[in-house]
Image: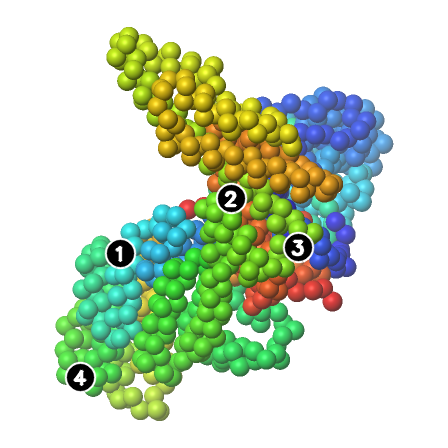
Amino acid sequence: MQPAQKIVIRQEEWERRLHEVNVSKNDLNRLVMDYLVIEGFKSAAEEFSREAELAAPVDLDSIESRMNIREALQRGDVGEAIARVNDLDPEILDTNPALYFRLQQQKLIEFIRQGKIAEALEFAQVELAPRGEESPEFLAELEKTMALLAFESSPSAPQSILELLSPAQRLKTAGEVNAAILESLSQGKDAKLVGLLKLLCWGETMLEEKAEFPKLDLREGMLTKLQ
Amino acid sequence: MSTPVPIPYPYLRHDTPGLDTDDDSIASASPPPARATPAPPAPGALLSNPALRLPTRWSEQDRHNLLTVSGDGRELTFYGAYCSCVGDRDSAAARANHPIPPACGIYYYEVEILQKGAKGHISIGFSSPEVRLTRLPGWERQSWGYHADDGWAFPGHKDGNPYGPTFDTGDVIGCGVDFTKHKVFYTKNGNFLGLVFENVGKGVDVYPAIGLRHQSESIRVNFGHAPFKFAIEDHVQSQRDLVWASIQTTRIDWDLLYGKDQKLDEDAPEKQDTATAVPKGGALEEEQMKAPVRKLVLSYLAHHGYARTARAFQAQCEGRHDTAAALDRDVDMDGGLQASSSTSDLDAELDLRARIDIVNAVLKGDIEYAITHTKQHHPTVLEREQGLMLFKLRCRRFVELILETSEAVKKVQVEEKESAHDKVKEEEPEPESMDGLGAMDVDDPSPEAHCMTSASSLDGTVPSASGDTLHPSSASRRSPAPASPSAVTARTALETAIQYGQVLEADYRSDVRPEVRSHLKRTFGVVAFADPLAAGGEVADMAGQEARARLANELNQAILESQGKPAHPALETLYRQTAACVTQLGLLGTGSAAFADMSKEFLEA
């Protein structure tokens, strides 16, 4: 195997190879179903199950409650989210103290966001401080959150602390809870389709160093012509 | 991408065991070894590709002449009758018969020390084919070796480093190369000794190689002929998981996926959305890529005409976008893409109800509808390739008519059986009478038999009497009563089918394209069977639902192509493109590609 100058793979040859890839419509349908389930598109998943004559990999009702939990967290309604998680499967929080702490922290953040300082203090002392003693990691997070009170959302506060109030923090918490629920249902955390896109990005970038070949233009769904 | 049936391709199969049994060393003095249990040295290898053979034995040619290879090709022994002729620096080395394909990801073999000899100057490792056979592996550039006498590892020059324990007679030394890291590892009696060396096998072929120096030193190799001492499969699995996890940290680069050259296109505003300077990683990045992925899914659903799913999906996307936007205006999560462009995309595609209805008609067997409406909405499609699409549709129409006939005949038979059964009961109430009835069907001039008769004479000269004889025979046989409605239906169906077949035959008689000839032949072949769907094999394949699905798919693609759209959904091309890239990377020696097992990651449940 000699150190290569780039080999050139012509359009026709490349298309032949694409054709030889062994993948069926049913395979692709299952990829799509996986996406609909993981991303929580319940009614689309139901329709797809009928139209494509494909069994759903999970109870589709679980999608709905998972989505409700996610939406509750994105709204900032942590109490509702916790109750719904426990309805779905109490073990999820019992066996995952870090996740439970994350939810409680989010609740504290929401108190502070709403300016309910007294509630925030009481909640921190009763619910969170004991957990902070359990692990240094929890304690650091608790301290960071409590710092929000000191700054009262003033713009002079350090970025890392202000971020706790950002929508990204809600998304992060919602994402962690979502992943934990999926795990409890023996589902992947990410849609396989996303993994496929990552693999293509990796593959095309790696191969570009060694070969010239037609790339995929995903917008058009067609191969780009070689120069 | 011309033929519709996918061809199986030797492609990173995790479960393909076996070494290449086809030994190509031409002047081999000893026969290729017989293997009882060929165990894969590295799962995930491109083992079925003949260009990617694995080592199976020591080479008879590529060895120092003081080394003897045993009959089965696995043992090497130093027979230096004249030790003195081996100078202080000189040794005797041998390489395996094939280089190691980097596409296997991790390659591993084991060596048992049969006889260490007096000094134990044994080196185990790898070397490229240019390396002299008078040197121990590890002493020369492009060779790497682990030495028994001092436990040092030599990376291609005489300055080695302490690496592992020494080894002795009876020890089993394992030797692996990890092409994802271009490093080597050794094991001793099943224990991992750690990674060593750099840039192994980058740009050169490497072979398993052994070096011996003294009288009676002897080793026996296991190239996967027998189970290994070391749990290599666990090791490979854990490395595979690491590599896969690392690949999955790749950031999705939409510029790359959307074709880099289009950066300054008319779509620039949309592109800015995906490239907005939000902090990398985590939830926000995830939010960002939602729109393009949704678009990918939506266009897939539209392509295949999953209209209800597409509508539900779109409605949910929009609902979500609204919630998200109302809550998080400062983030602008989906960049507005949902509401604007993909809606119109969907409408544009779904409003082509015509296409979907046509495709569904083919799937249901309503070919007439498909032909009429294709003619109306997509006239160029039927003219493609000198009317090939139309020809195929018409052939299918004929098959459908035959199937209808077969159904109608079946119905008549059931009715006849029932009425005959009643009669038998009345006249001779024997419990075994059903057998007699079964035999009767074969001999009687039933409509079924007629169908077969007419089929055999289909090529132009169908006796018009066939239709006429049907009625009297079936009527006169059992009951003096007039033909039942189902018998009439069956007769009409048969007549229609025959007529259609005659016209079809006449219209394409002069078309000499081999494709047309063979398709026509197979189409008429269906007629010979009373119940084509139950016939199995090629006939059922030609008549069954699978054939409808193939034709529907072909027609769908033809319509899309006639509109300048891709014949395959972007999602499908995405999968194929990815698989082709990964395979090509494997062939070009990127070991990590061997661990991107797509069917395991994406297709298995």
**Please, which chain is the residue tagged with disc 1 on?**
A
**In this view, A110 is above or below B74:** below
Is A29 or A98 nearer to us in this picture? Answer: A29
Q: Position of residue B247 (x, y in %)?
A: 53, 58
Same chain assignment for discs 3 and 1? no
Say which amino acid is labelled 4.
Lys
Q: Which residue is mark 3?
A: B384
Q: Which residue is mark 2?
A: B548
Q: CA distance from mark 4 to mark 1?
A: 35 Å
What secondary structure is marked by label 3?
A: helix
Q: Nearer the viewer, mark 1 or mark 2?
A: 2
**Which residue appears at 38% of the width and 15% of the height?**
B437
Say which amino acid is labelled 2.
Arg
| Residue B338 visible here | yes
Direction right: furthest residue: B85
Q: Nearer the viewer, mark 4 or mark 1?
A: 1
Which quadrant of the view contains residue B89?
top right
